Each structure stands twice: as C-alpha cells, then as structure tokens.
C-alpha cells in the first residue's frame, strides 16, 4: 500500500515537503478550487467540486471531519473533449469568520453555512447575485460584517457587497438566535450596468428587515453608498 505522501498529487520536487496525505471520502479529488484556513477553529476548508461540497479538515489532527454539500459540483463543457466548465462548476470561492462560512457556487449564488449547526441544517441560506456564472473570489472585513464577492466570469465582471453576520450580533447589539434555517440575514449591494437604481430586497433573499435596499451599478468603478435602514 502506498504511503500518504506518494502517488498522484504528491510533490515531485524537493522544494515542497509533504507532511502527510489526508483521506477524503467520496469521489477522487479531481476538481477543486479555493481553500481557506480558520486558525481560531483549527479548520481548513476546501472547495471540493468532485464531491459537490466544502471539505472541512481538522488542522490539528490533519484529518477530514466532514463535507458540507449542496453545491452544483463538476459541470462539463458540452463540446468535446468535455473538459470541466470552470465558469459553471462549484464550489468556488470560500472564506469564513467565526462560525460562519461563506462559499460561492457555479450557479451565481452565495451559500451561507453555520459551522456550529447540525449537519442537516449547516447550509442556512442561498443568495443569488443575479448572474449566470460562478461566485468566485471573495473577501471579508476584519470584523466579518462586510463581504465582497466577485462574479469574475461574467461579461462584464461584477462584484456584490454583502452585509454579513459578523460576530453573531445584530445592529442593536443583541445576539441573534441562529437555530432555524431562515434566521441569518445578509443584505446585498450589487453593481450592475449603466445606471444606479434602488429596489427593496424581497423575502426570498432571507432578509426580513424593512427598508433594506439593493443598489446596482456595474459601470461604476466604486460601490455606491447604500442607505440601509430598519432595526
């Protein structure tokens, strides 16, 4: 039986040292994207397209913990030689803050995952950014209350700015109960084409607050100011 640092994928030069190999159940890991480390939780997250989910690895024991599913997985190009269609496969970008994991998918959606929730309730929210291709690279502020995600495969590319969950506190400082699937709230400020227009966000975005507004302006080099009201 081959050792953990031998075989396909193992380093073939002396410039990189293999510490160990980590077994991931399911399909062989043939297509994957961005990964992220959360040192506070001791976890590593990998966008595993081969298994249509985010692999969670314990960085202390160097062992697989679980795979959080619900993503589109590998999408093949319809034309020969039927290579992986990166623009529509997922998961893609991934980042985290505290208990919250944010991951982009190949169908232009952002998925919000509660790492402390039971496995069947981990995927708490799916939010469309209004495109047709992957939600890819993303960045969080230090406090975890703003998230910017890029639809870089669109023509033209655009980004979406979300008011994220931060440290589990609402604007009024009261800790939110996150036991139900509908409880997380993200407000989006989107960049769209040629003009800026405001429209109230509907309940399908999972945002029950009144007065939250989405602003769209793809042609603008900066995100317009957002007037978000309500408590």
Image: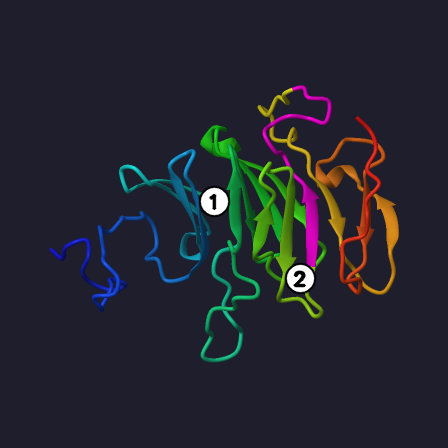
* Residue 161 magenta-highlighted: yes
Q: Provide the residue designation for mark 2.
A: 132
Provide the secondary structure element on which disc 2 rests. loop
- Picture quadrant where residue 223 is located: bottom right
Q: Is residue 231 above or below residue 52?
A: above
Q: Residues within 10 Å of mark 2 (few under 14, many from 20)?
A: some
Residue positioned most to the bottom: 80
Q: Quadrant of the N terminus?
A: bottom left
Q: Which mark is residue 69?
A: 1
Prevailing SS of the magenta stretch? loop
Work out whether residue 108 can be spotted: no
At 53% from the left and 74% from the top, the residue drawn is: 78
- Picture quadrant where residue 3 is located: bottom left
Residue 73 is situated, as x and y percent measured from the top left of the image, at 48, 56
Q: Nearer the viewer, residue 8 or 100?
A: 100
At 81% from the left and 37% from the top, the residue drawn is: 228
């Amino acid at each position: 039986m081959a050792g953990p640092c031998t075989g396909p994928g193992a380093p073939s030069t002396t410039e990189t040292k293999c510490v160990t190999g980590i077994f991931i159940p399911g399909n062989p890991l043939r297509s994957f994207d961005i990964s992220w480390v959360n040192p506070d939780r001791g976890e590593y997250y990998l966008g595993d397209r081969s298994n249509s989910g985010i692999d969670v690895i314990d960085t202390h024991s160097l062992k697989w913990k679980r795979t959080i599913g619900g993503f589109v997985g590998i999408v093949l190009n319809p034309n020969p030689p039927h290579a992986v269609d990166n623009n529509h496969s997922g998961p893609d970008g991934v980042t985290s803050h505290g208990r919250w994991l944010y991951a982009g998918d190949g169908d232009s959606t952002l998925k919000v995952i509660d790492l402390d929730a039971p496995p069947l309730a981990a995927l708490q929210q799916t939010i469309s950014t209004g495109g047709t291709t992957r939600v890819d690279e993303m960045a969080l502020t230090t406090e975890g209350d703003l998230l910017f995600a890029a639809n870089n495969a669109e023509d033209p590319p655009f980004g979406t700015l979300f008011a994220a969950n931060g440290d589990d506190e609402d604007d009024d400082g009261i800790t939110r109960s996150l036991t139900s699937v509908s409880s997380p709230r993200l407000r989006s400020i989107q960049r769209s084409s040629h003009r800026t227009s405001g429209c109230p966000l509907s309940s399908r975005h999972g945002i029950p607050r009144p007065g939250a507004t989405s602003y769209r302006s793809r042609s603008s080099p900066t995100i317009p100011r957002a007037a978000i009201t309500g408590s």
